[in-house]
Amino acid sequence: MKKLLKLSIFVLLSSLLFVGCGVAPIYNVKTKIDSPKSSATTYRAIKQAGTSLGWKITKIRPGVAQGKLYLRTHLAVVRIRYSAYSYSISYVKSKNLKYDPVKKVIHTNYNGWIQNLDRAIEMLL
């Protein structure tokens, strides 16, 4: 009985430690577009979706855009590669988001922001 109690306490404390940490592996997106249109249409969907969520989307060159999200003291910057057939969202840099370049982890909110952006783009394509 004592072993079970000790094990339960250990598991509980360990889970609290990881929950309190608030970091997770960086979430990147690679999505194929089901019914391709044109790369210009893909960019318009990315721009509209990003803007609706507070992202500033800027075209860097054909097929490549940059997204910046400023929230309070936080900054997330992503590179968005796109074509008529697919798009991808990749981490570039951040500020105040607990990014660890060695472990490739970041604050869990970042991943939520990227997932929301991805869903919004998918809805427009």
Image (cartoon, rainbow, N blue to C red):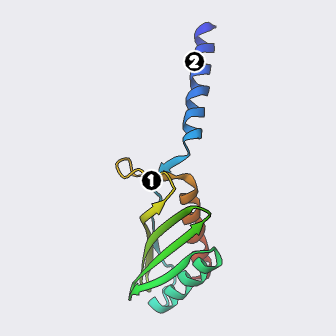
Mark before the other along the chain sequence, 2 or 1 = 2
Along the line of sight, the residue nearer the viewer: 120 or 75: 75
Q: Amino acid at mark 2?
A: Leu
Quadrant housing the C terminus = bottom right
Tell which residue pokes out farthest to the left in this image. Answer: 102
Name the mark on residue 63. Answer: none
Please give left or right for residue 64 compared with residue 36 in the image.
left
Quarter of the rendering containing residue 10: top right
Residue behind mark 1:
99
Residue behind mark 2:
7
Tell which residue pokes out farthest to the front in this image. Answer: 73
Along the line of sight, the residue nearer the viewer: 107 or 84: 107
Residue 38 appears in the figure: no
Quarter of the rendering containing residue 89: bottom left
- The x and y percentages for residue 109 are 58, 56
Characterize the local packing of mark 2: few (<14), some (14-19) or many (20 or more) Cα atoms within 10 angstroms: few
Along the line of sight, the residue nearer the viewer: 1 or 51: 51
Q: In the figure, 53 relative to 39: above or below?
A: above
- The x and y percentages for residue 117 are 57, 71
Element on which disc 2 rests: helix
Q: Amino acid at mark 1?
A: Tyr
- The x and y percentages for residue 23 are 51, 47
The residue shown at (61%, 65%) is 71
Q: Please identify, in this view, whether the residue under mark 2 or under mark 1 is nearer the observer.
A: 1
